[in-house]
Image (cartoon, grey):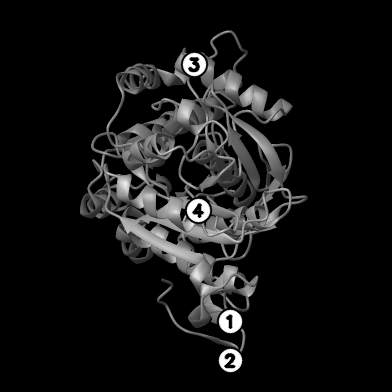
């Protein structure tokens, strides 16, 4: 998964403060529209497990807000099974152990029927044992490193084959500059390390030699990029077209891009393909040094479809702020929430086992004009877009996959997992099924 900018700009703080206050009264948004029959009876509780304080608040507060919008909209439509939806919001405060405590509270005390939450992989891995122990349902909305397949988690963000692999395919192509050397630069934790392991093996399969792959990791919050950018510049001066694949997270992106500008490294010289910089993050940056740089996602706010226009319109009305941006993880929550609504409706119950089984095969129109389908491995089908950063903080789409790509829980580019699949439908019903030995490894799905 990607992390974001821990240190908020004054502009970002202002947006978040306003959004939080608006969200608190969110059930009444779009007052001019006709109401369906009011839902009655015992509420169905929906857990929202996102950091509203600490370093992750800048990204996760927005996801809390979009969940409140979706719940308000569903209640306006008559609720679910005729009953009202009731959000139960907790704040794990960017504290990974606290995520597990809050998850246990939501499932065992508040008795929620589904949880939408987490951003970092470490937070997801903290709560996974809790959801498996208590048989809860978690919708995880952020791109991640894969190599996991739990029956109790629905991964609505991208797997590596739905973001990282298509991104380097683009850089390798003539259209993307025919790169021959790659600098894999990332923050030092599980998502960049696992993603770069997958990418290095994939690049070698494409004929890229070991000496043409540079790997560098830095701590969260890295501020001094002078030496590393100099190394990248020297690496790119060897006569071969060079590209940077960035899994840098948090506010370290700001000085990284600034240093590229300081040393005269432009997007045409050495393009940077980022996996963790989106509209929300750009809103807190000076975008001048970033124009022309690239990012790979499954959704951009700039995509021109009727569905996306309506979503953005409703978001602006809900937040009462026409400048609030939308982003990829918000679309993932939109898809996941509507799939859960469909599954509960189809099953006629919120019983967790029945809903989990019913989720497989559910289809939901996405915001980019296609349709997402929940696969037996609890991942989605997704389109992939390459966007070029513009000076207004938006992305101009320069490339997209011709069709949706099915998410892979286990990467074929990691030798230890190349034969594994996840399949929670019968008769396999296993998160780590070995297709070579035709056996299920066991209950450990990570």
**Residue that carries the numbered disc 2 in the rendered image:** 437
Task: Choose between 203 and 49: the one closer to the eye.
Answer: 203
User: Earlier along the polypeptide chain: callout 1 or callout 2?
Assistant: 1
Q: Residue 27: x and y, percent?
A: 45, 20
Q: Residue furthest top?
A: 32
Quarter of image, res 312: top right
Quarter of image, res 94: top left
Mark 2 → mark 4, Cα distance in angstroms? 35 Å
Task: Choose between 103 and 7: the one closer to the eye.
Answer: 7
**Residue that carries the numbered disc 4 in the rendered image:** 245
Q: Residue 332: x and y, percent?
A: 54, 43
Residue at (33, 42) in percent of width and height: 252
Residue at (55, 80) in percent of width and height: 433
Left or right placement of residue 101 versus residue 423 in this view: left
User: Earlier along the polypeptide chain: callout 3 or callout 4?
Assistant: 4
Label 3, secondary structure: give it. Answer: loop
Question: Pointer 1 and pointer 2: residues touching (CB < 8 Å)?
Answer: yes
* Residue 118 is at least partly visible in this image: no
């Amino acid at each position: 998964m990607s992390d974001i900018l821990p240190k908020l700009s004054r502009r970002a703080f202002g947006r978040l403060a306003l959004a939080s206050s608006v969200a608190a009264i969110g059930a009444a948004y779009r007052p001019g529209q006709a109401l369906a029959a009011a839902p009655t009876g015992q509420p169905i509780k929906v857990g929202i497990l996102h950091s509203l304080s600490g370093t992750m608040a800048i990204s996760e507060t927005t996801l809390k807000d979009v969940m409140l919008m979706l719940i308000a909209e569903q209640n306006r439509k008559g609720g679910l099974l005729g009953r009202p939806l009731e959000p139960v919001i907790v704040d794990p405060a960017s504290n990974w152990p606290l995520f597990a405590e809050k998850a246990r509270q939501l499932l065992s005390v508040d008795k929620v029927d589904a949880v939408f939450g987490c951003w970092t992989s470490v937070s997801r891995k903290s709560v996974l044992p809790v959801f498996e122990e208590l048989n809860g349902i978690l919708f995880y909305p952020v791109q991640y490193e894969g190599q996991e397949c739990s029956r109790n988690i629905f991964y609505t963000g991208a797997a590596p084959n739905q973001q990282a692999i298509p991104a380097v395919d683009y850089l390798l192509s003539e259209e993307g500059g025919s790169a021959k050397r790659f600098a894999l630069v990332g923050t030092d934790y599980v998502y960049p390390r696992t993603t770069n392991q997958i990418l290095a093996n994939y690049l070698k399969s494409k004929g890229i030699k070991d000496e043409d792959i540079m790997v560098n990791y830095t701590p969260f919050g890295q501020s001094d990029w002078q030496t590393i950018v100099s190394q990248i510049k020297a690496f790119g001066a060897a006569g071969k077209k060079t590209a940077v694949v960035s899994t840098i997270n948090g506010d370290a992106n700001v000085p990284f891009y600034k240093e590229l500008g300081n040393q005269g490294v432009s997007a045409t010289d050495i393009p940077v393909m980022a996996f963790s910089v989106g509209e929300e993050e750009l809103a807190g940056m000076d975008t001048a040094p970033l124009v022309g740089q690239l990012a790979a996602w499954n959704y951009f706010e700039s995509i021109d479809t009727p569905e996306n226009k309506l979503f953005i319109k409703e978001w602006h009305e809900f937040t009462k702020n026409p400048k609030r941006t939308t982003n990829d993880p918000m679309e993932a929550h939109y898809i996941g929430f509507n799939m859960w609504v469909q599954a509960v409706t189809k099953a006629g119950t919120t019983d967790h086992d029945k809903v989990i089984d019913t989720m497989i095969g559910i289809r939901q129109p996405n915001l980019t004009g296609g349709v997402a389908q929940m696969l037996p491995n609890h991942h989605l089908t997704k389109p992939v877009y390459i966007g070029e950063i513009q000076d207004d903080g938006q992305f101009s789409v320069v490339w997209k996959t011709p069709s949706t790509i099915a998410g892979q829980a286990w990467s074929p580019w990691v030798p230890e997992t190349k034969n594994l699949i996840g399949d929670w439908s019968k008769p396999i019903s296993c998160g780590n099924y070995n297709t070579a030995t035709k056996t299920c490894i066991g209950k450990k799905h990570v």
